[in-house]
Image (spheres, rainbow, N blue to C red):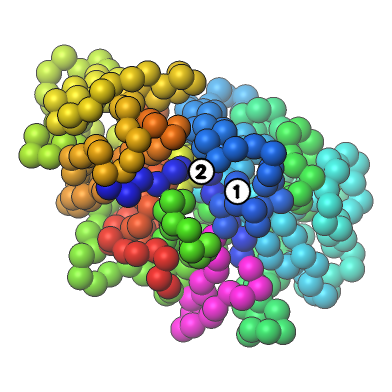
Amino acid sequence: MALAVGLAWFVLLSFSAEASHGGFTADLIQRDSPLSPWYDSSTTHFDRLHNAFRRSIAHANRFIKPSPNTIQSEIVPSGGEYLMNISIGTPPVEVLGIADTGSDLIWTQCKPCKQCFNQNPPLFDPKLSSTYRTIPCQSNSCSNLEEASCGADRGDTCVYSYLYGDRSFTRGSLALETFIIGSDSSRPILLPKIIFGCGHENGGTFDESGSGLIGLGGGPLSFISQLNGGKFSYCLVPTSDKSSVASRISFGTAGIVSGNGAVSTPLVSKQPDTFYYLTLEGISVGEKRLSYKTSQSTKVVAASEGNIIIDSGTTLTLLPPGFHDDIVSALEVGINAERVSDPRGVLSLCFRSKSDQDIDVPVITAHFSGADVKLQALNTFARVEDDMVCFTMIPSDDVAIFGNLAQMNFLVGYDLEDRTVSFKPADCTKH
């Protein structure tokens, strides 16, 4: 049994991005990898793993229905799971932003700054770019914003205001600009007239390693929605792999998932449209199928549409307590090993195990509408101490999320046009 360890991820759209037939592919690098600006060599492997689990729980709060005084896509920016390194403007200026599947608006800090957080990369100055254009208040793009206005000092320019779940914020001008991925060593990928926010007032818990945020959600202003066809896919390398091969993310036609072994399930349209909702009908532990039920369910009923969010930025999988308890009970029967408690109190089902060979984990199958996804041991259990493995699905009263541990070694494709999410078993160490 090969067990993965689930750390949070970030994506670096590196300068080796490959373009082909309207699509392009780039590297994904783990947030806690030595290649990350967030890497802390003073922490142990298990510490980083548990930090990822804790971030996972905090990260899930952004999916809870927001109050009327906040925007729909709440996130915790300091818990950003990806970084995207691109260039914007003419001449191009490198921008390093948190990339997030739970947010839509692309924005970066801009000169002049009325209020800005410290950042290592240089600030973008729109006055120096020949391709920068502000967007008028009457535009459809402006009306897609939750909060927008026409500032007295900015004429007809659409002024956006975003407030995040942890009270971080950005305010500025909505604009069009050229985005560039690539360099002299590979054919640059030019994406003209991308809508983004030029932030003149920004603050909160943003990290100085970054310069803003790049939304990969399903809303109309996200980076994905602005690409032709609204397609992207990724393949997450198990973190137990020692080859240092980067994971990959593909956009456009390069993001199509098809062929032998691929299964697809409908994307369910719900509000907010930022998030990717799927329908989970049940989960099987070995041959025992358990029907999805909410914590309020007293009997088995048909699973409601869009009952779970798929998110690559959440490490753990979160399930309704009653449904989670049914799975835990089945695993206790199916696993012949000593049950122990997680000393850090995060995970609910742990077993004593000194090697991956001394515990036999049943095959767990996620039954999505129209798509059975057979999970391996690395998708459902992680070694959290030298002599302990734990189940990486936890109970949650508030929201159900299919996290990134469950997605490792799958090619996972999103198609906003056909409204599907596809899964295909893969060895993500081989590109």
- The verdict on residue 387 being magenta is no
Residues 1 and 405: in front is: 1
Looking at the rendered structure, the kind of residue marked 2 is Leu
Region rendered in magenta: 14-28
Asked if 416 appears above or below 342 in the picture, the reply is below
Counting residues from the N terminus, which is met first, the one under dot 1 or under dot 2?
2
Q: CA distance from mark 1 to mark 2?
A: 7 Å
Residue tagged by mark 2?
A: 7
Left or right, 144 with reference to 261: right
Image height check: is 158 above or below 243? above
Position in image of residue 253 (x %, y %): 42, 74
Image quadrant of residue 359? Answer: top left
Q: Residue furthest left?
A: 287
Q: Which mark is residue 299?
A: none
- The residue under the point 55% across, 65% down is 27
Q: Give the class, few, some or many, for how many residues have Cα within 10 Å of label 1's Cα (few <14, many ≥20).
A: many
**Kind of element beneath mark 2:** loop
The image quarter in which residue 320 lies:
top left
Residue receiving disc 1: 31
Residue 217 in the image, given as x and y percentages of width and height: 50, 50
Q: Residue at x 77, y 65 (%)?
A: 94
**Residue for point 85% across, 43% down:** 118
**Spot occupied by residue 49 in the image (x, y as percentages of width and height):** 52, 37
In the displayed structure, 73 sits above or below 84; it is above
Please state which of residues 156 and 427 is positioned toward the viewer in this rendering.
Answer: 427
Q: Is residue 163 left or right of residue 45?
A: right
